[in-house]
């Protein structure tokens, strides 16, 4: 195996773990959506989103990745908000 293939295998292993964790996150997001619906809370909590990004930037070992982590979490939170909204609408039908 050459160096490139080795790096790709490492990325594949990380992707596998990311997928597992993202699925777990989505399942939890649906529980949050149920709670928000029950308590008539909005899907968007901008203050919470800001804190999530700040907390995860603080976790970085390599602070050169601050912009990428910000983009990553904004993308994740956009997807999860859409997922919450979709499932909340589905339950209303």
Image (cartoon, grey):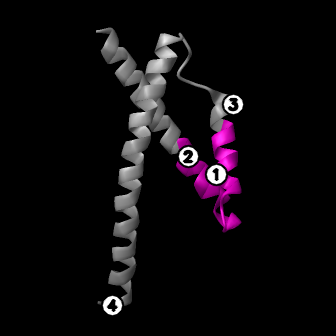
Quadrant in which residue 31 is drawn: top left
Q: CA distance from mark 3 to mark 4?
A: 46 Å
Residue placed at 53% from the left, 22% from the top?
Answer: 43
Mark 2–mark 1 contact, CB under 8 Å? yes
Q: Which residues are magenta?
A: 50-74
Residue placed at 48% from the left, 11% from the top?
Answer: 38
Describe residue 48's horizontal placement relative to residue 31 as left or right.
right
Name the residue beneath numbered marker 3. Answer: 47
Most extreme residue toward the bottom, as rendered?
2
Name the residue beneath numbered marker 1. Answer: 56
Residue placed at 44% from the left, 35% from the top?
Answer: 28
Quadrant in which residue 3 is drawn: bottom left
Name the residue beneath numbered marker 4. Answer: 2
- Quadrant of the rendering where the C terminus is positioned: top left
Name the residue beneath numbered marker 2. Answer: 73
Q: Secondary structure at mark 1?
A: helix
């Amino acid at each position: 195996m050459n160096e490139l293939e080795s790096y790709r295998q490492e990325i594949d292993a990380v992707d596998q773990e990311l997928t597992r964790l993202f699925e777990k996150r989505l399942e939890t997001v649906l529980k949050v959506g149920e709670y928000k619906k029950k308590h008539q809370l909005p899907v968007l909590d901008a203050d919470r989103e800001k804190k999530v990004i700040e907390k995860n930037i603080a976790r970085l070992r390599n602070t050169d990745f601050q912009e990428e982590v910000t983009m990553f979490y904004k993308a994740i939170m956009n997807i999860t908000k859409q997922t919450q909204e979709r499932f909340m609408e589905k339950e209303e039908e």
